[in-house]
Amino acid sequence: MIREALEPLKGKCKKAELDYMINALSLVFGIESIIILKDLNGLSNEAILQNWRWTVKRITNSSID
């Protein structure tokens, strides 16, 4: 799913860089991320989504929404 979402970046960066982005984002979108952000940090569901969007933009250095 992440690879498919980053398809627009194919050809705009090296394959190795794209692979690193995919791996980094895999860490973000697991249940562990939700547990940490919700239970430990006290974020709402909307705040979690906002943090995920921020993270994706920083990892991909783009405006992917």
Image (spheres, helix red, strand yellow):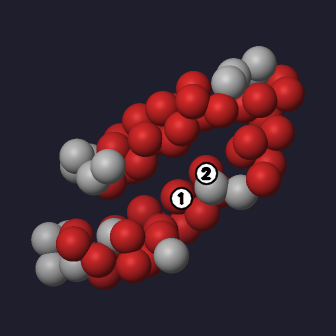
- Which type of secondary structure does the marked residue at label 1 adopt? helix
Question: In the picture shown, does residue 43 fall above or below 17?
Answer: above
Q: Going 63% across and 55% down the picture, which residue do you hit?
A: 29
Type of the residue with mark 2? Val
Q: Residue furthest top?
A: 42
Query: 41 or 11, which is in the foreground?
Result: 41
Question: In the picture shown, does residue 58 fall above or below 13?
Answer: above
On the image, numbered disc 2 is attached to which residue? 28
- The image quadrant of residue 53 is top left
- Measuring from the top left, give residue 4's x and y in whole percent: 39, 79
- Measuring from the top left, give residue 60's x and y in whole percent: 32, 54
Q: Going 41% across and 35% down the picture, which residue do you hit?
A: 54
Type of the residue with mark 1? Ala
**Mark whose residue sits in front, 1 or 2:** 2
Question: In the picture shown, does residue 38 fall above or below 23?
Answer: above
Structural distance between the alpha carbons of marks 1 and 2? 7 Å
On the image, numbered disc 1 is attached to which residue? 24
Check whether the beta carbons of the residues at disc 1 and disc 2 lie within 8 A of each other: yes
- Measuring from the top left, give residue 23's x and y in whole percent: 54, 67
Q: Is residue 2 left or right of residue 35?
A: left
- Which type of secondary structure does the marked residue at label 2 adopt? helix
Residue 58 appears in the rendering = yes
